[in-house]
Amino acid sequence: MSKTALICGVSGQDGSLLAKFLLEKGYQVFGTSRNVKNISNLKKLGIETQVSVLSLSLTDAHQVQQVMESVKPDEAYNLAGQSSVGLSFKQPVETIESHVLGTLYLLEAIRNLGGHARFFNAGSGDCFADAGKEEANEGTPFSPRSPYAVAKVAAFFETKNYREMYHIYACTGIMFNHESPLRPESFVTKKIVQAACRIAQGSKEKLNLGNLTIRRDWGWAEEYVDAMWRMLQQDIAEDFVIATGQSHSLEDFVAQAFQAVDLDWQKHVEVDESLLRKHEVLESKGDAGKAKERLDWQATYTMNDVVKSMVGAELKS
């Protein structure tokens, strides 16, 4: 018998890539979205007819319970919620509610149904804001510096508490930045790649960016959804940091993107002070040693690989 998976947030980058990954493993895949018509990523991957998409707002406890009772998944993946750090400062209430209430309602639904479903919660490397140049691991204290990170920390502890109190198989993947061509335009990585490609094709625009010195641990999203699945296949539920272990500056990312289209980035990029954040996380890097040891998972894509793949896909689109 094939397993059934429920992916909350199936229309996003991670949700759609995970759906494709699970379908290839023979799963029956259900996905939820606040807007069932928003399946462009599933169409890009050619799987829109293979995924049963259900309308669901994770902040509605009754709806969550109904969907869980209807699908009865073997595995439930919580990839939904407002996912932009920058936007979380403008929409803190929506951000907090979507992650904190959404995670709680999913866990409660699983508990009410006897705790059968294994639960994956998508955490974030942003929870370790003050780790600085140190590689953050599962024992590094959280120090959130944005509404988004605060919400992710709360969801992490909700998941941990349900695992410990109710013996539900529930775990969090504390995932550092991971990209793909499916990133929405609101993310700076996609903004950079699209601008570089447009300029290479003749556009006279300037690319306006904020702090170019910030450093991030950038990985490849397809590898990260593999890690999510591996976490739910273990005998015992545990939390894992998922990262490459390398950090690069935003300037490095920009330079690589423009180099991929044979341009000098310095001729086309301007720093816009209005885009600077007061509480910017200057450096972010993760230690995925535990994932390598327990899950046999290790990132193989470097930042340069990520940029080249995103530029290549953009030029073909």
Image: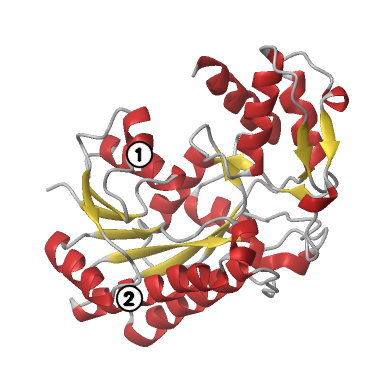
| Residue at image location 62% in from the left, 28% down from the top | 194
Q: On the image, numbered disc 1 is attached to which residue?
A: 21
Residue sticking out furthest to the bottom? 165
In the rendered image, which quarter is residue 74 located in? bottom left
Query: In the visual, does 173 lie left or right of 263?
Result: left
Query: In the visual, does 231 lie left or right of 299?
Result: left
Is 198 drawn above or below residue 90 in the view shown?
A: above
Where is residue 258 shown, x and y percent of the image?
Answer: 75, 23
| Residue at image location 58% in from the left, 19% down from the top | 312
Query: In the visual, does 249 lie left or right of 24?
Result: right
Crowd class of label 1 (few under 14; some 14 to 19; many from 20; radius 10 Å): some
Crowd class of label 2 (few under 14; some 14 to 19; many from 20; radius 10 Å): some
What SS does tag 1 mark?
helix
Is 189 drawn above or below residue 146 in the view shown?
A: above
Does residue 237 appear in the picture of this structure? no
| Residue at image location 41% in from the left, 58% down from the top | 80
Q: On the image, numbered disc 2 is attached to which residue?
A: 105
Q: CA distance from mark 1 to mark 2?
A: 26 Å
What SS does tag 2 mark?
helix
Q: Nearer the viewer, residue 21 or 255?
A: 255
Q: Which mark is residue 230?
A: none
Marks 1/2 in contact by CB < 8 Å: the verdict is: no
Q: Nearer the viewer, residue 232 or 292?
A: 232
Precedes in sequence: disc 1 or disc 2: 1
Q: Amino acid at mark 2?
A: Tyr
In the rendered image, which quarter is residue 61 located in? bottom left
Where is residue 150 shown, x and y percent of the image?
Answer: 60, 73
Query: In the visual, does 187 lie left or right of 235?
Result: right
Q: Amino acid at mark 1?
A: Phe
